[in-house]
Amino acid sequence: MINIKLLRESPEVMRVALARRDPALFETLDKIARLDESRRELLGRVEQLKARRNKSSEEVARLKKQREDASTLLADLKELSGTIKELDQEIRSVDEELQEAILQVPNPPLDELPDGGADDFAFVKAWGEPTPLDFDPRPHWELGERLGILDLPRGASISGSGFPMFVGMGARLSRSLVNMMLDVHIREHGYLEIAPPLLVNEDSALGTGQLPDLEDNMYVTRDGLYLVPTAEVPVTNFHKKEILSADQLPRAFVAYTPCFRREAGAHGADTRGIIRVHQFDKVELVRICRPEDSPAELELLLGHAEKILQMLELPYRVILLAAGDIGFASAKTYDIEVWAAGVGKWLEVSSVSTFTDFQARRANIRYRAEPGVKPDFVHTLNGSALALPRTMIPLLENNQQPDGSVEVPAALQPYLGTDRLMPDGTA
């Protein structure tokens, strides 16, 4: 969540930053300022009244000790206690309204982000060149059917549209990609593997910023638990409500999970194939660090995601999202997009983001720079490395051959056990 102290002390700084996201946020910021002022005024009044009550209580005790009449003072004390109780209730009410308003405000974007929306990203770099195919490339849904590895009709029959079913070598391909990614991140990049719960409580979803902003996109059970839209949620909350020591940082976690997203409002967009689905597998990286280290940690995280694409020989580009296009909790986001020959477009396979102390404030994750000093909030970062099935789409489409087979990149062959997928569904 935003730093209300910064909003209180430097309101224009916060307003200017958030205006780059949405000027309509000014109304909420003004409401927060009013509620904060009201809460502080009420707290001041209550503190004064409690000081009076304490003094009067001491006087009553003195009078009783001296066997003098304290009835008038006792009546005043009763009235004073009633007033304090009413003000305490008013403070709780204002505080609840204040916290609700604060939860509606996104993370201020960092200064280096370009202004604008989805079309105003800044190109950062590219790796590899899309290889032109000397035949008309098939899209992945046709390849998947011909190879016998993707059964969209049966997936839809079982669960509904947007729930793909991978069959035979398709299921094996998915598993092989996940295993390769986990091995690289654990063995080469030093991440600690986590196998987290797939259901999280409201407190955890609030901690990472999925709630309230993305509630419409989440699946929720009747007992109030949410299916994870990404492993970011349970893994970032690994240290919630804890105080770490400086020598524990940075922390680096990797987790594979299925992810569940309703994608509310996305009907009609990329409905063919597996570009946009409600259930998909993903390997997620989460890093927790000291604030001064987060810029370097973001670049490190980006490089770890890029490494997988380079191993898979998939040409990609990295873009820096504009201030009006980053996610609710993000302060800066790189998107990695891979060229997919069959659908003829760049597909996002990873978002790599720094959240500064936004998530840490919500989840109350702090660290102590040295013994005895006041704890401060950590910075959190995460990135997909990588998301399936969008990694599978260019893998199939870019490596397809005129005979309908698909060549398998060398780095993946030991995991998949073959160098080629054949149209009859065999290797």
Image (spheres, rainbow, N blue to C red):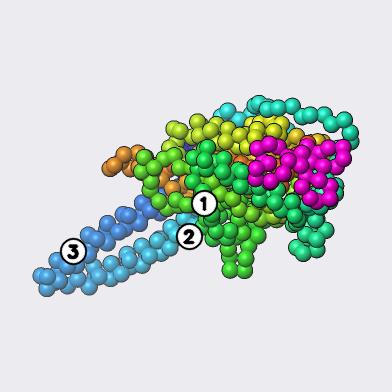
- Which residue occupies the foreground of this view, 327 or 423? 423
Image marks 2 and 3: residues in contact by CB distance under 8 Å: no
Q: Residue at x 48, y 60 (%)?
A: 93
| Residue, disc 3 | 59
- Asked whether residue 118 is drawn in magenta, I would say no
Residue closest to the far right = 136
Cα distance between the residues tagged 2 and 3 = 33 Å
Mark 2 and mark 1: span between their CA atoms? Answer: 39 Å
Relative to residue 399, is residue 353 drawn left or right? Answer: left
Query: Is 403 a magenta residue?
Result: yes
Residue stretch rendered in magenta on the structure: 399-427
Question: In the rendered structure, which disc, 2 or 3, sits on the residue that comes first in sequence?
Answer: 3
Q: CA distance from mark 3 to mark 1?
A: 61 Å
First in sequence: mark 2 or mark 1? Answer: 2
On screen, residue 155 versus residue 101, left or right, reads right
Tell me whether circle 2 and circle 1 mark residues in contact (CB < 8 Å).
Answer: no
Q: Which mark is residue 194?
A: 1
Helix, strand, or loop for circle 2? Answer: helix
* Numbered disc 3: secondary structure: helix
